[in-house]
Image: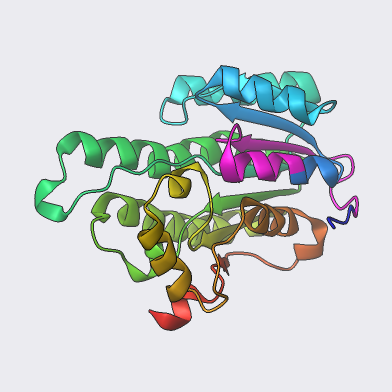
Amino acid sequence: METKTGRLNGKVALITGGARGIGRATASKLKEEGARVAIADRDLAAAQATAQELGDGVFALELDVADAASVKSVVAQVLERCGRIDVLINNAGITRDASLGKTTDEQWDSVIAVNLTGTFLMTREVAPHMVKQGAGAIVNAASVVGVYGNFGQSNYVATKSGVIGLTRVWARELGRKGVRCNCIAPGFIATDMTAAMPEEVLAGMKQRTPLGRLGAPEDVARAYAFLASDEASFINGQVLGVDGGLVLGT
């Protein structure tokens, strides 16, 4: 049974890509921990539905993380509504998988724009407000493939490796100003995307994971919540694997 600790009581959290899957689970967990949560997503209708399901203290905003004007607008709306941003969860991400010779310019550019540039734009806009407050926590979505690579994912791996690098830069730049920056590196997580995969592919994923199962969105959400909380007050610039031990077998 999930335990509520109130680790984020009184804090305001902004999560990108929060309408579904890991993002939705994270929005729910942050609310359980006491935060007021802004769900920002390209699919406004889905974000609104999630916010309505989660109830009081959760609201939805339309966001294209790859568009600087959209990013500025969303951050301004959260600040106007809540007065501060204590937690930024850079969760939004997409995949457009193909082997090197078959990766199109559009596949490359779109993944870079959302996963890497989007993380940069969001953090660049939010960080000055956290610095002004003298406190804040930024948690970015990396991946185990950002550390070890993966066949057919040149674009995705490039972004997740880049996110790890950005996390370490920002941990150095912002840490002295009271703002921590870390990232998580999930392995195989059971989402709508994996649910559509053939059973033999899922079986192979489970076999490669020492714990013998796929992760649940809630497993990642708990990691996000921990790194966002004061319990992680001396953790900065780190990559937290949420992969069931997957990297041990790579």
In terms of depth relative to the viewer, which is nearer, 38 or 236? 38
In the rendered picture of this protein, how many numbered marks are placed on residues? 0
Q: x, y (%) of residue 181? A: 61, 56
Q: x, y (%) of residue 64? A: 47, 25
Q: x, y (%) of residue 206? A: 48, 69
Q: Is residue 70 above or below residue 5?
A: above
Q: How is the image coloured?
A: rainbow
- Residue reaching furthest to the bottom: 248
Q: Quadrant of residue 77?
A: top right
- Residue reaching furthest to the front: 199
Q: Residue drawn at (33%, 57%), measured in percent from left and top?
A: 157
> Can see residue 165?
yes
Q: Is residue 173 above or below residue 53?
A: below
Q: Residue drawn at (69%, 67%), measured in percent from left and top?
A: 235
**Range drawn in magenta:** 5-28
Q: Is residue 104 above or below residue 203?
A: above
Q: x, y (%) of residue 191? A: 52, 47
Q: Residue drawn at (68%, 53%), measured in percent from left and top?
A: 218
- The answer to whether residue 204 is left or right of residue 13 is left
Q: Residue drawn at (15%, 39%), measured in percent from left and top?
A: 104
